[in-house]
């Protein structure tokens, strides 16, 4: 794991593991797993779980398995399996030869279910789903026992075998654990272990099975079969832990993993529900799972995030048992810091305004050297063609401007970064009175970054009009304009909180010529504009598309402050 993270800070899970090692539990072995269900792409919340499980394995010289929890074939498919593998690998983690599927254990799970029946700890129940629900009782009211609870072992074995054989319709029967209908923990009120599901082709087992085990039965058994020592999951499974332990206690599995729960990641202005993310994709609200506005790992990658920035983010947010929501700014800071250090600088003009340097030779041109990174000489230099006509950004020019405007004004001077100081002598307008061109003069004695004896207020970026390359730039904003779109508590559905301006596409931008050769996914700082990467999906020989990964500074925080102040 060459690009894997530094050892992560301590947390309560690591304390438990430290104690287990001290008491030589599991012979000091540490084995974790990351168990995604292949029913969607991974999101930033999963990244937290991945970093935690693989990070612990790495730090304790242990192992972490990748295990697909594939017991719901009607919602799962192989595209998701492949995407998940790609995302985990991209994050910098390696499961080596430990890639598993819960479906690998279907035969064993069936045998353990038979074992439970033989111990009179499971029975086939003919109640309908609705009846089971009403028999279950409530938090304040005990459940009622199913009339099928007293079936003989022989009858149960026969019915369960016939369930497997396909003798019964979907929903006709289920296998249930026989625990306690009076338990204050609803999960222990004879939970369903197996259900019948015909007519689905499982991506791993095809049509071999028409009964599928439930998560609460599958998970502990899979963990035990893989020799997992610490089964780390999110807080909503806390109430399931007694059932997890019950299963492990009553079937003859080789070991006794321990379930530990931590709080899931919530991030402002987005949502983590795979079901709702699937809706966004399928209903066309975004361009796909890898849309750069999505909180998916594939989306963040396409947006320009690095694996290191996501691992850094997961380190920063920490691991605890208390529910919290993380500000988007924390995620943005992680990538900003990474790119500030590592992204080469380039010049790109997003709103081009032509500047003619009237005293520069008509067909003159020269190369001016420009550092790739102002603080890091090892990143080297590049040569930029300078010509009589250049583009600057419209935002960098005002005909009249207040004193604090440190860019170009009519009659004023400004430095073109890495090149010359120019003076604006004439503003050319069209019939509508719009500025279409500036006529400037340059001072030939001012070439370079900061020659002596020459003070101008501002420095702006530029691109040669002759050699610049046309590009499309996509600016992204929050996908939602509510901090908790799927939990807004205003009676409105998350769709109503979608931000209509989350994508702004700018065409006709001009970028420095070297960028024409940039590879898909390559990341840059466009000076004074932000961090950008080449969109690997939309870019082609004829079309150069950049995604803005993040702005230079946390402008969002400023806007929020403003909103609060108003
Ligand atoms: P669902 O079960 O609703 O499809 P899920 O988000 O639980 O969605 P899984 O594929 O079951 O998806 O998750 C795999 C692992 O990632 C689980 O161990 C789960 O606890 C963990 N996980 C999922 N969402 C988050 C989150 N927001 N923060 C931290 N861990 C998460
Ligand atoms: Mg889940």
Image (tube, rainbow, N blue to C red):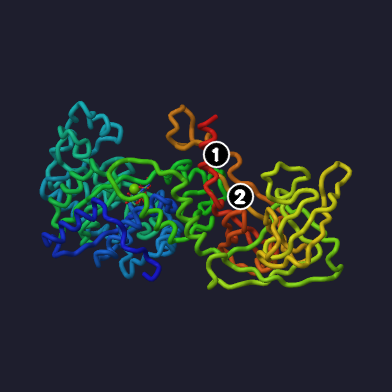
Front label number (2 vs 1): 1
Dot placed on the residue nearer the N-terminal end, 2 or 1? 2
Numbered-mark total: 2
Which residue is found at the position 85% from the left and 51% from the top? 426
Looking at the image, residue 8 lies above or below residue 433: below
Which residue is found at the position 12% from the left and 62% from the top? 24
Looking at the image, residue 370 lies above or below residue 294: below
Q: Residues within 10 Å of mark 2 (few under 14, many from 20)?
A: some
- Quadrant of residue 191 within the rendered picture: top left
- Quadrant of residue 103 within the rendered picture: bottom left
Residue 202 badge: none
Looking at the image, the residue that sits furthest to the front is 453
Q: Secondary structure at mark 2?
A: strand
Q: Find the distance from the CA under tag 2 to the CA under tag 1.
A: 17 Å
Which residue is found at the position 72% from the left and 63% from the top? 469
- Would you say 168 lies left or right of 375 here? left
Where is residue 158 drawn, in percent x and y?
19, 49
> In front: 426, or 491?
426
> In front: 173, or 288?
288
Ligand 1 within 8 Å, label 2 CB: no
- Evaluate whether residue 101 shows in this view: no
Q: Which residue is mark 1?
A: 559
Looking at the image, residue 357 lies above or below residue 563: below
Q: Which residue is mark 2?
A: 475
- Would you say 23 lies left or right of 217 here? left
């Amino acid at each position: 794991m060459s690009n894997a993270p530094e050892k992560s800070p301590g947390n309560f899970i690591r304390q438990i593991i430290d104690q287990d090692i001290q008491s030589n539990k599991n012979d000091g072995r540490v084995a974790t797993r990351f168990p995604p269900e292949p029913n969607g792409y991974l999101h930033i919340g999963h990244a937290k779980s991945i970093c935690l499980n693989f990070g612990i394995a790495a730090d304790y010289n242990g192992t972490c398995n990748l295990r697909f929890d594939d017991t719901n074939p009607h919602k799962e498919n192989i595209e998701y399996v492949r995407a998940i593998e790609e995302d985990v690998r991209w994050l910098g983690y390696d499961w080596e030869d430990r890639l598993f599927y819960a479906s690998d254990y279907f035969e064993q799970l069936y045998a353990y279910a038979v074992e439970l029946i033989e111990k009179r700890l499971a029975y086939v129940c003919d109640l309908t789903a609705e009846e089971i629900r009403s028999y279950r009782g409530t938090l304040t009211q005990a459940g009622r026992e199913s009339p099928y609870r007293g079936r003989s072992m022989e009858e149960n074995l026969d019915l369960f075998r016939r369930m497997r054989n396909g003798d019964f319709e979907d929903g006709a029967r289920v296998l249930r654990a026989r625990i306690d209908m009076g338990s204050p923990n609803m999960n222990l009120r004879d939970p369903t272990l197996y259900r019948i599901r015909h007519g689905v082709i499982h991506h791993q087992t095809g049509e071999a099975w028409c009964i599928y085990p439930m998560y609460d039965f599958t998970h502990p058994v899979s963990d035990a079969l893989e020799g997992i020592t610490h089964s780390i999951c999110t807080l909503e499974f806390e109430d399931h832990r007694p059932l997890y332990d019950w299963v492990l206690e009553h079937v003859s599995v080789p070991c006794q993993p321990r379930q530990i729960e931590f709080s899931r990641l919530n991030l402002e202005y987005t949502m983590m529900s795979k079901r709702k993310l699937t809706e966004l994709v399928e209903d066309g609200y975004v361009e796909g799972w890898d849309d750069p506005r999505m909180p998916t790992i594939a989306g963040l990658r396409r947006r320009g995030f690095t694996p290191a920035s996501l691992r850094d983010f997961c380190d920063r947010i920490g691991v605890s048992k208390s529910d919290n929501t993380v500000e988007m700014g924390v995620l943005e800071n992680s990538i900003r810091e990474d790119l500030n250090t590592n992204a080469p600088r380039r010049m790109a003009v997003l709103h081009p305004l032509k500047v003619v340097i009237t005293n520069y030779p008509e067909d003159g041109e020269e190369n001016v050297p420009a550092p790739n990174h102002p603080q890091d000489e090892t990143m080297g230099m590049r040569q930029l063609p300078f010509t009589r006509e250049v583009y600057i950004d419209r935002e960098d020019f005002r005909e009249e401007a207040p004193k604090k405007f440190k860019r170009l004004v009519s009659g004023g001077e400004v430095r073109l970064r890495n090149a010359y100081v120019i003076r604006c002598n004439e503003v050319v307008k069209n019939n509508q009175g719009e500025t279409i061109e500036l006529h400037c003069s340059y001072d030939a004695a001012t070439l370079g970054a900061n020659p002596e004896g020459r003070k101008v207020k501002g420095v702006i970026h530029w691109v040669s009009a002759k050699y610049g390359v046309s590009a499309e730039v996509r600016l992204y904003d929050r996908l939602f304009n509510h901090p908790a779109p799927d939990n807004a508590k205003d009676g409105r559905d998350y769709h109503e909180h979608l931000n209509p301006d989350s994508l702004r596409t700018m065409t006709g931008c001009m970028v420095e010529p070297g960028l024409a050769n940039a590879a898909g996914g390559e990341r840059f700082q466009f000076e004074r504009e932000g961090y950008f990467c080449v969109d690997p999906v939309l870019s082609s020989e004829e079309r150069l598309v950049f995604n803005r990964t993040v702005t230079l500074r946390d402008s969002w925080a400023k806007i929020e402050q403003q909103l609060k102040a108003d």
